[in-house]
Amino acid sequence: MIHATALLLLALQNAPAPQPAASPTPVVPADQSTTPAESKPDLARSLERAGDNAAELKRAIETIEPAFRADMEWLVSTMPEIDLKSLKADFLVKNVRLAERARAEAPWGKAIPESIFRQYVLPYVNVNERRDDWRQDFFDRFTKEAWKFKDPIDATKWINDHLPDALNVHFHATKRRKPDQSPYESMELNYASCTGLSILVIDACRACGIPARMVGCPAWKKVQGNHNWVEVWWDRWHNVGDSGSDPRGVDWVEERCRTETDPDDWVHAVYAAVWRPTNTKYPLVWAFEIEYVPAVNITRFYTDAVTHEVSVPGGGPAEITVMWAGELVVRAKAGADGKAKLPLARGGQFEVIFVKPDGSVVMQVVKP
């Protein structure tokens, strides 16, 4: 956490406000709409933007196994320009292969939706930190124990409990050199901010095939400072607010978000860093000028969380997926009674897709 409110407010005065999140896009049952940049024209534009490094990106696409090529093309299509111009084929091929291996071997891997895998397991970086080659190292360090659990939330709790000692990196607000330390910068120093620790936890989770992302608030409304933390996916997003916190429980971050954030004031909103392009940037307190980290405003999932009951049109069981702002946010099942309770947010518009046993599909728009 950064305790430098004066510097923060000075930066806020000169920082462009993030634009409103993109309105929900039309959805399809397989949730492919969460990966809008996977078309060939987008790939061609990325290769053009890569300049002299385009040959490396083409080599990564041509080198990767055919079964993984669509994911590599999607990654290249959605990479920020800074990476298009610098990352090499070997780095990208290694990253994709290990992400695919984690998906294939993790006990929960085959149940991860494709769009969730692509955005929150496949990427090699979280925000603007240095691009370290961490995946093999973290795969070797954490998968053996993490994969003893059948549930990725239990595995996340184990990672969150053991990571600071396993890597010898602990929180310190002043001994860290900068907020946005990369994994090896933090491991060399042995200290990290909330942001640096979040990067470590997310990368460890991704190495184990657990979808994870960074979430943060640029400034609390009354309490001094900001905070960045972790969310992990298993049928919905679960908050991992701090070292040792349980994703299934309520911690101080959730309590503070209820009283210290505002969904309509970007300075006090809660953002999730996503990989696909959006109309919103993740506000980096340490580098407001950086525009290339996409985000969605998820404040209402903390301030206005609600359990909303839905009924399957026509009754009977169904597989349920819920889309919001171009994101898959909930996956659930309705039993024989045709009912299900969904963790949503008041004030949002959700597309609820019901897939029945006979393969028929029905979509409803829900506004809790």
Image (tube, rainbow, N blue to C red):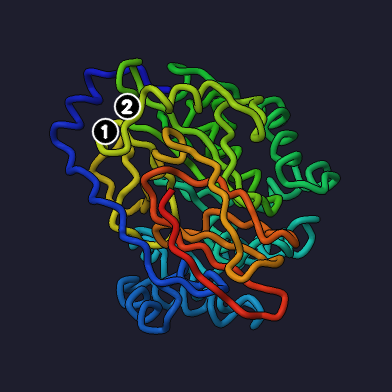
- Residue that protrudes farthest toward the right in the picture: 148
* Closer to us: 54 or 11: 11
The residue located at (22%, 18%) in the rendering is: 6
The residue located at (62%, 80%) in the rendering is: 360
Residue 191 in sight from this viewpoint: yes
Q: Secondary structure at mark 2?
A: loop
Residue 161: x and y in percent read 71, 28
> Do labels 2 and 1 touch, CB within 8 Å?
yes
Residue 329: x and y in percent read 52, 54
Callout 2 crowding tier (Cα within 10 Å): few <14, some 14–19, many ≥20: many
* Closer to us: 196 or 42: 42
Identity of the amino acid at label 2?
Answer: Ala
The residue located at (32%, 77%) in the rendering is: 45
Residue 39: x and y in percent read 42, 81
Kindly identify which residue carries mark 2: 219
Identity of the amino acid at label 1?
Answer: Val
Q: Earlier in the sequence, mark 2 or mark 1?
A: 2
The residue located at (54%, 73%) in the rendering is: 362
Does residue 202 appear to the left or right of 138 in the view shown?
A: left
Residue 285 in sight from this viewpoint: no
Q: Secondary structure at mark 1?
A: helix
Spatial CA span between label 2 and label 1: 6 Å
Residue 267's tag is 1
> Looking at the rendering, which quadrant does residue 223 occupy?
top left
Does residue 254 appear to the left or right of 5 in the view shown?
A: right
Callout 1 crowding tier (Cα within 10 Å): few <14, some 14–19, many ≥20: many
Q: Is residue 163 above or below residue 131?
A: above
